[in-house]
Image (tube, rainbow, N blue to C red):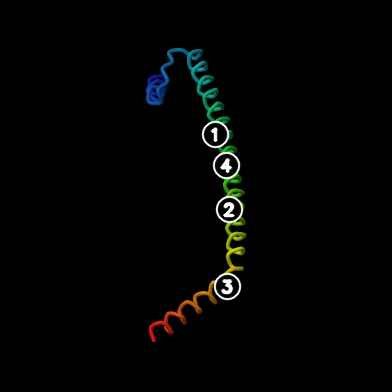
Amino acid sequence: MKSVCQARLRELGITAATPTEFIEKAKGIVCSHNTLKDKSSSLQEEIRRLEQEQEHLIQAKEKELLEQAGFLLLFIPYTSNLLDTLISRSFIKYA
């Protein structure tokens, strides 16, 4: 039984000859796990914050583009009339 346990521990990368050594190794694994869990939570929070920031930037850019497009739409009737005039003049010129 003891050799089976030691074989399984070696598979996990744990070399402990005594119960005290095993407990110390286990404590180290738990500490490493908690550190990784904290880091994971921190990274998840940073990702959430960056996604929100990206969404705000997208919304601001969309608003800016819509305002620019609205401004340009004011000139479409004039542009259309100007093009009609230029086209009709070119037909008269070559007719």
| Mark 1 / mark 4, whichever is N-terminal | 1
Give the crowd class for mark 2: few <14, some 14-19, many >=20 residues within 10 Å: few
| Mark 1 / mark 3, whichever is N-terminal | 1
* Residue kind at label 4, given as amino acid type: Leu
Q: Quadrant of residue 4?
A: top left
Tag 4 secondary structure? helix
Spatial CA span between label 4 and label 2: 16 Å
Spatial CA span between label 1 and label 4: 15 Å
Q: Are marks 1 and 3 in contact (CB under 8 Å)?
A: no
Give the crowd class for mark 4: few <14, some 14-19, many >=20 residues within 10 Å: few
Task: Name the residue beneath numbered marker 1.
Answer: 40
Task: Name the residue beneath numbered marker 4.
Answer: 50
Residue drawn where x is 60% and y is 41% of the image: 49
Residue 1 appears in the figure? no
* Residue kind at label 3, given as amino acid type: Tyr
Dot label at residue 61: 2
Instruction: Give the quarter of the figure containing the C terminus.
Output: bottom left
Q: Are marks 2 and 3 in contact (CB under 8 Å)?
A: no
Residue drawn where x is 55% and y is 31% of the image: 37
| Mark 2 / mark 3, whichever is N-terminal | 2
Q: Please, which residue is most extreme toward the front here?
A: 93
Q: Is residue 47 depicted above or below 1 in this figure?
A: below
